[in-house]
Amino acid sequence: MGLPYEGEWTCFDEAFYVYLPTELTVEEITEKMQTEGIIAYYSSTNEQGVTLQIQIAKQGRKDSIEAILAEYQAFCDQAVYVTINGIPAVTAYSGNELYAEALMENGEAYLMKAEFASDFVEAMDIDETQGIYVGGMLYSITATPLEIAE
């Protein structure tokens, strides 16, 4: 699949890969974030002042994809089961937050959370370009790096 950005494969725990844009800035992970399982934190601000924040978190062992889906259905506007590059996952959104939680073959779950923030965050809608950009990241989840078409 072609993606709307130049990026590189980033590996977490030698098990979970995501194709992330090269323009993202690696941010510091606080102690509190570490206790929440966050293993990576990135951000990028566009010309309109909208900041995209990406968090990658190790969620621990999960019983099933159905259990993960039920978790997101409890607090999200929409949550669906999908298969991303052969991996069972749940994608969901709530307000300006988008989620993709993948259940890896070894039973470990990894979460990729994308959040848009700006001075007008309450009124902001994610436009089509931003949606495609983040969708490309969320749907790049894989167990091994894939070939990305331009």
Image (spheres, helix red, strand yellow):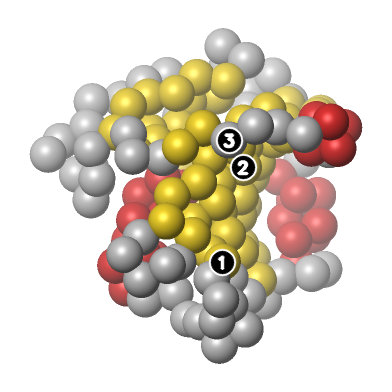
Location of mark 3 (residue): 27
Task: Answer left or right for 18 relative to 104.
Answer: left
Q: Residue at x 74, y 61 (%)?
A: 72
Image position of 56 with respect to 132: above or below = above
Amino acid type, label 2: Gln
Examine the rendering and report whether any part of residue 63 can be seen: no
- Name the residue nearer the viewer: 48 or 98: 48
Q: Position of residue 109 (x, y in %)?
A: 71, 33
Judged from this view, the residue extending furthest toward the left is: 150
Location of mark 2 (residue): 55
Amino acid type, label 1: Ala
Location of mark 1 (residue): 117
Whether pointer 2 and pointer 3 mark residues with C-beta atoms closer than 8 Å, the reply is no
Which badge, 2 or 3, is on the more N-terminal residue?
Answer: 3
Please state, as top left, top right, bottom left or bottom right, where the C terminus lies in the image. top left
The picture quadrant where one finds residue 78 is bottom right
Image position of 123 with respect to 54: above or below = below
Examine the rendering and report whether any part of residue 43 can be seen: yes
Q: Nearer the viewer, mark 2 or mark 3?
A: 3
- Name the residue nearer the viewer: 113 or 48: 48
Give the distance between the C-alpha atoms of the residues marked 1 and 2, in whole angstroms: 14 Å
Give the distance between the C-alpha atoms of the residues marked 1 and 3, in whole angstroms: 15 Å
Task: Answer left or right for 42 relative to 105.
Answer: left
